Structures are given as C-alpha cells and as structure tokens.
Amino acid sequence: MKRFYKAVTTQLHDGRWRIALDGRPIKTAGGNAQLVPTHALAEAMAQEWAGQGEEIDPSAFRLRDLADYAIDVVSGEARAALVDELAAYAATDTLCYRADPDEPLYPRQLAVWEPLLASEERRHGVRFTRVSGVIHRPQSLETLVRMQQAVAALDPFPLAALRMLTSLSSSLVIALAALEPEADAEALWDAANLEEDWQAEHWGRDEEAKALRQTRFEAFALAMRFAALARGDDLS
C-alpha cells in the first residue's frame, strides 16, 4: 500500500490519546476508536506511522497491533477467557520445576529462579510449591486463586502485554515480573531460557536457533516496552 498521508499527530480526546493522519483519527482493526491511555504510548505509535516510507510496511506496526488487541479483544467479551488462560500458567509455572538437587543444573536454577519466584510470592502473598523433576504436583488453591486475581486486576493494555510475555516465557511469574517498573528484559529472558541455554553450553547452538532466540527476545522486549508506555513511562 502506498503511503496516503503526510502529517502524523497525537490528540487528547476524552482523557485518552489517539493518533491522527492528516488530522483524521485512526480506528482499530476491529473498527473501534483507537484510544490509548498515555501520551507516551500514543507518541510511540505515531512514530510507527511517521517512520513509513513511500510504501507502508504492515509488519512495522507492532505497538499498534498490541493496542488494537487490547481495545478490540481484551476490552471485550474475550477478557474473562484470556484471564483464565493466563492464570492457568500458575499451576505449572516453569520456575517451580527444577532438576534434582544433586544435578549440575540445580544450583543455577536455584540462583536465577528462586529470587524471581520469592519476589512474586511476596508481591502477591502466595506460596508456590517447588518440584524436583517433571512429575506434576498441584499448587495450593489459595495460590491459584490469588494469581488469578492478580491477572484479573490488570487493565486491558498491560493484560495484552502479559499475554505475549507469558506465551514467550512459558512462565506467569516471569511475565508478571516483566510488567514491573525497572524490570530487566535481558535478565528475565535469560531466566526464561535458562534450561535451553544450559543445553546449548554443553551441546552447542546452531545459527538458526540463535536467530530464533533473538527474534523471540525482541518480541518479549517489545511487550515490556508496550506495558511501560501504557503506564506513561517516557522511554525516548
């Protein structure tokens, strides 16, 4: 598609922000008004439009796509099912399943995962069951209920980010930690990939696997950036 606009601006409307192309507000993919919670997020989304050349590249609108998902899907009837889907990760969170204590991998899991898990426990007043090996052990009902409440309490924009973060990390604990201010994207991504990186250290990693890991990290960092901008953080 050819670029059909010249000026890209942001506008305050009913307490929220929107992007306008030559003065005309944008709608979401679902046809809803594209209103975002902060000026910081609107400005970052405007840059996606402003940065287009003569031909529009749809793949460049990554923040816009997340915003549209938050507005069209998370703010609608699908919200309850999404909360259930994400909260279910707490029942089998990756950080709870570790090697046996006498295995070489265990000390690294303990050093990297335990602080993250303990921090989440303090934040939400829960207690996760740690498991050695792959045999499933259930978490307490109280922990599962409180984690579901933590997910359900999120506004649509951080909840949209959480969906991407949880899917990429296979851990609700890591995903929720990624929503916190000052979260370290690289440290959290390393934690999510600890076992894969351990195997690569011992057996090697091919170039295709390296490229895939980087691509997934960029998506993880993007979701963190989206959540930060939706909070109002100025990341410029």
Image (tube, rainbow, N blue to C red):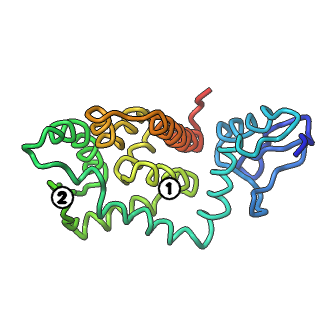
Depth check: 204 or 164 in front? 204
Mark 2: which amino acid?
Thr
User: Measured along the vertical axis of the image, is residue 201 above or below residue 15?
Assistant: above
Residue under numbered circle 1: 163
- Residue 111: x, y in percent? 20, 36
Q: Position of residue 84 (x, y in %)?
A: 43, 69
Question: Quarter holding the C terminus?
Answer: top right
Query: Which residue occupies 42% across, 41% down?
Result: 180
Residues at marks 1 and 2, CA–CA distance in whole angstroms: 23 Å
In percent of width and height, residue 199 lies at 28, 39
Residue found at x 80% / y 35%: 52
User: Of the residues under marks 1 and 2, which one precedes in the sequence?
Assistant: 2
Residue in the foreground of this view, choosing between 53 and 211: 211
Q: Residue 152: name its quadrant.
A: bottom left
Q: Secondary structure at mark 2?
A: loop
State the SS at label 1: helix
Residue 129 bears which disc, if any? 2
Give amino acid for label 1: Arg
In this view, the residue farthest toward the top is 236
Residue drawn at (46%, 54%) of the image: 167
The front one of 15 and 97 is: 97
Q: Is residue 15 above or below residue 110?
A: below
- Please say if 197 is above or below 30: above
At x 70%, y 49%, the residue is: 16
In-image side of 24 versus 89 (left or right): right
- Residue neighbourhood size for the residue with mark 1, other residues' Cα within 10 Å, grouped as few (<14), some (14–19), many (≥20): some
Q: Is residue 232 left or right of residue 11?
A: left
